[in-house]
Amino acid sequence: MNSIDSISCVSELKDSLSSLKVKEYGRETIIQLLNSKGDKLEPLYQEADRVRQEHMGDEVYLRGIIEFSNICKNDCLYCGIRASNRNVKRYTLSHDEILETASAMINNQQTTVVLQAGEASMLSDKEFGRLISRIKKETSLSVTVSVGNRPYETYRYWRDCGMDRYLLRFETSDPGLFRALHPACTLEERLECLGYLIDLGVQTGSGFMIGLPGETMEILADNILLCRTLDLDMIGIGPYIPHPDTPLADQKNAYEGNEDMFFKALAVLRLVNPDAHIPATTAFDAVFPGEGRNLALQRGANVFMPNSTPVQYRKDYLLYPGKPCVDETANQCATCVAFRVESLGRTIGKGQGHSRKDRHTKGTDAGIVSHRN
Ligand code: SAM
Ligand code: FES
């Protein structure tokens, strides 16, 4: 399935999920795998690692992330930079700062810049498009953007400026839970935005938090299946971590005391989505300091997103407590990442690490596709 065009509402989507036969992995099988314990765990991780190697190889692609603004108009209940959090010192990087930071990535074997920010018009669509064009013209980097829900025309304009990829997590596949956590947006609207991106031919990434308060095993299984239904190019998942300055401060992760669930979810995600790029996300390191992302790379992940935000801004982009690398410079992070990847016997990806899906690779050299119409 290449588009969610035909799916007009969430209930239809849910129906299509339960009737979907994803290879042998249906909802029940997924729940069974997520319940693996004891001596069943290691074989699950090994199978995820094998499927990752078979479909994605041993290369780990490095995508440097610049958290270029923490200004957000939304009030997502779990998020440390939500609009109502008065303890956050707000910032936005200038175009020149972003360009200088992005250019430095090339010496650190990073072939993609990820531009992430809160959801706010901190700069106009036109200005942001100009920034994308400049990065594409002045560097060899691929450009991934992650700035939330936007109109179709905006995504199209940014694509025409050279935007290669877009990240927009659906956060949870449960419409009621989504509604409770996002005062400004419904799951249907979020999925509509993902549909725009897919239809525009932008390499599309989505994903979810593991263990949001109120999540059940059925919801977790449906989250994994929704990634498959959307046929995503990239899938980012990571544990939900309560932030003290949010309304969910006292709400524990649904799997507290059962943290293996974070890796089980990642491993099953890989089995169900063999040819998607899956990053070892930062939140794994917040829960398992110093080793979370290494373990994620050994249990299904094939991408690493080193933090490249200039060090003076990092402590102001705390989505959750315990975020690693807040005192390190971009160069220190880059050196550390290279060491981590090599220590696992893996190599750093040399190419752009574009989508492996046929719709992006057919008829192009080396999997690099132009999206301009
Ligand atoms: N504004 C953009 C958006 O909403 O897609 C990008 C920034 S948003 C902060 C990036 C991601 O951070 C969200 O998609 C969410 O999954 C994750 N996040 C936010 N708060 C979190 C928390 N308390 N624990 C774990 N992840 C969190
Ligand atoms: Fe806007 Fe989190 S509430 S980025």
Image (cartoon, rainbow, N blue to C red):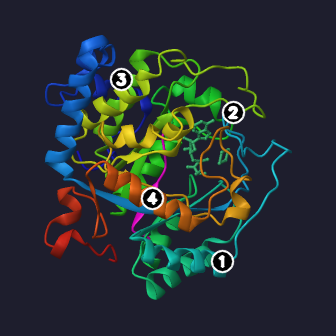
Q: How far apart are marks 2 and 1 (CA)?
A: 30 Å
Q: Quadrant of residue 76?
A: top right
Q: Mark 4 points at which residue?
A: 166
As shown in the figure, which amino acid type bears the numbered disc 3?
Ala
Q: Name the residue located 45 percent from the left edge and 87 percent from the top edge.
A: 137
Q: Residues within 10 Å of mark 2 (few under 14, many from 20)?
A: some
Q: Give the SS element for disc 3.
A: helix
Q: Name the residue under label 1.
A: 97
Q: Are marks 1 and 3 in contact (CB under 8 Å)?
A: no
Residue at the spot of label 3: 221
The Cα atoms of the two marked residues, 3 and 2, are separated by: 23 Å
Counting from the top left corner in percent of width and height, residue 372 is at 34, 77
Question: In the image, is residue 316 part of the stretch drawn in magenta?
Answer: no
Q: Which residue is drawn at 28% across and 48% down?
A: 276
Residue 181 coordinates in the image, percent (x, y): 63, 30
Question: In what element is the residue under mark 1?
Answer: helix
**How many numbered marks does the figure carry?**
4
Please, what is the three-letter code of the amino acid marked with disc 1?
A: Glu
Q: Which of marks 3 and 2 is nearer the N terminus?
A: 2
How many other residues sit within 10 Å of disc 1, few (<14), some (14-19) or many (≥20)?
Answer: some
Q: Which of marks 4 and 1 is nearer the N terminus?
A: 1
Residue 175 vertical position relative to residue 299 in the rendered view, above or below: above
Residue closer to the observer: 13 or 258: 258
Visible residue check, residue 256: yes
The residue at which mark 2 appears reads as 77
- Spatial CA distance of label 4 from label 1 is 21 Å
**293 relative position to 254: left or right:** left
The magenta segment is 163-170
The amino acid pointed to by label 2 is Leu
Mark toward the start of the polypeptide (1 vs 3): 1
Mark 4 vs 3, N-terminal side: 4
